[in-house]
Amino acid sequence: MKILKNLRKLGFGLLLVTTVVGASGEVPMPEIPKAKQNFSAEQSCIEPTDIMRRQHGTFLKHYRNDTTRRGIRAIQYNLVACINCHVTADESGNYPNVHKGSEHFCRSCHSYAAVNVDCFQCHTSQPQESFSSDMGPVQSD
Amino acid sequence: MNISTQNRRDFLKKSAIVTIAPGVLLYSIAQAHNAERPVTSATRWGMLIDTNKCVDDCTACLNACTEEHGLTENVPAEVKPVWIRKVTLRDRQTGKESSLPVMCQHCENPPCVDVCPTGASFKRDDGIVLVDRHTCIGCRYCMMACPYKARSFVHEVLENQKPHSPRGKGTVESCNFCVYRIDTGKDPACVEACEAKGHQAMIYGDMNDPDSEISKKLKEMSSSVLRPDLKLNPGIRYQGL
């Protein structure tokens, strides 16, 4: 009985702690930069937006193995294509740094969600237009 | 010289269309890798390097590699990445010297793959030996296992990598045969550079296809591999050693 009581106290304590943190730690909603163009008239990205928001990590991780290990390159879930379309320059023509601030497309959400994004330790985080034609189904202008 | 080498390929393509029966032509198109399907062991990519045509002080292939993969970070010489290097071999008996480029030899039985504890070092079905840097933990066991000293380790944080050639700190890397070029039907950067210089010391192609230029050359000329005693059956072969 005593254990049960203690547990109930503990539960109440935890509830209190979480509500206090929730109320004080207001994180501003991310300002997500707009992509360069829409995939089609009906759809903004290669999959509907809600699917892209939830599953882009899975897509990239799954298909990276197909490309690296099996040489399948005609894949639309392509990090280079994401970067080419989603990372846009500011007024002075500079691209945002993925390792600093939250202006970079990937960082804007990942900072908000507090999820580490390791891709850019190896992959470039900036578009290089001249290469877009080499890298599969990139939507070019 | 430059123009004539550029046109050689086109000339060969056109002559193939004219002379070869339609059925045979269809077959040869099917041999080219379709980027929608996985690569298969029906293809074995290889390279034949003619050491007699390789010019001593020419570094066109090295420069092309550096440029193509962005191996330009400012680091001390002892940790500089080297994917391809020029080596001078001297026959002790005769004193004959030959200069040749040495890179990952893309072995059929690669020791780097044998020793890799995570499976990051792997051989693609078409014979290209690669490092999957998603799973590489940077232990450098493969670097010790490689008898050709072909692999490098990235010691510093990198920025502005080439989109087609990602590389980063804490992982091992080596010549990848410009795999993204091969998959889209282009020649590796070093071969292209050698051809552009007019030396034509490097021929690359499918060694399993009896009609490829490399197969025909290998059949008619004698060629050798580096360290044949190890029985690794490299994909890079040398002529005139």
Image (tube, rainbow, N blue to C red):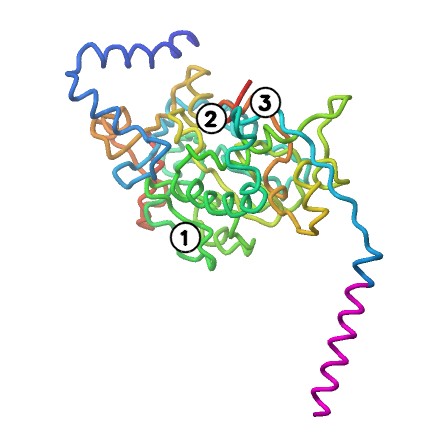
Q: Amino acid at mark 2?
A: Ala
Determine which residue is flagged by label 1.
B113
Q: On the image, which quarter does residue A128 sit in?
A: top right
Q: Position of residue A139 (x, y in %)?
A: 52, 24
Q: Chain of mark 2?
A: B
A8 drawn magenta: yes
The disc label shown at residue A129, or none: 3
Callout 2 and callout 3 share a chain: no
Q: On the image, which quarter does residue A121 sit in?
A: top right
In what quadrant of the picture does the N terminus of chain A appear? bottom right
Near mark 2 (Cα within 10 A), the count class, few <14, some 14-19 or many ≥20, is many
Query: Where does the magenta region start and end?
Result: A1-19
* Number of marks present in the image shown: 3
Q: CA distance from mark 2 to mark 1?
A: 24 Å
Q: Position of residue B79 (x, y in %)?
A: 62, 44
In what quadrant of the picture does the C terminus of chain A appear? top right
> Which of B31/A58 is in front?
A58
Callout 3 and callout 1 share a chain: no
> Which of B113/B196 is in front?
B113
Near mark 3 (Cα within 10 A), the count class, few <14, some 14-19 or many ≥20, is few
> Measuring 44% from the left and 21% from the top, which residue is drawn there?
B192
Determine which residue is flagged by label 2.
B189
Figure check: B177 above or below A65? above
Figure check: B196 above or below B97? above
Figure check: B76 above or below B21? below
> Which of B158/B1 is in front?
B158
> Which of B130/A59 is in front?
A59
Q: CA distance from mark 3 to mark 1?
A: 35 Å
Q: Amino acid at mark 1?
A: Val
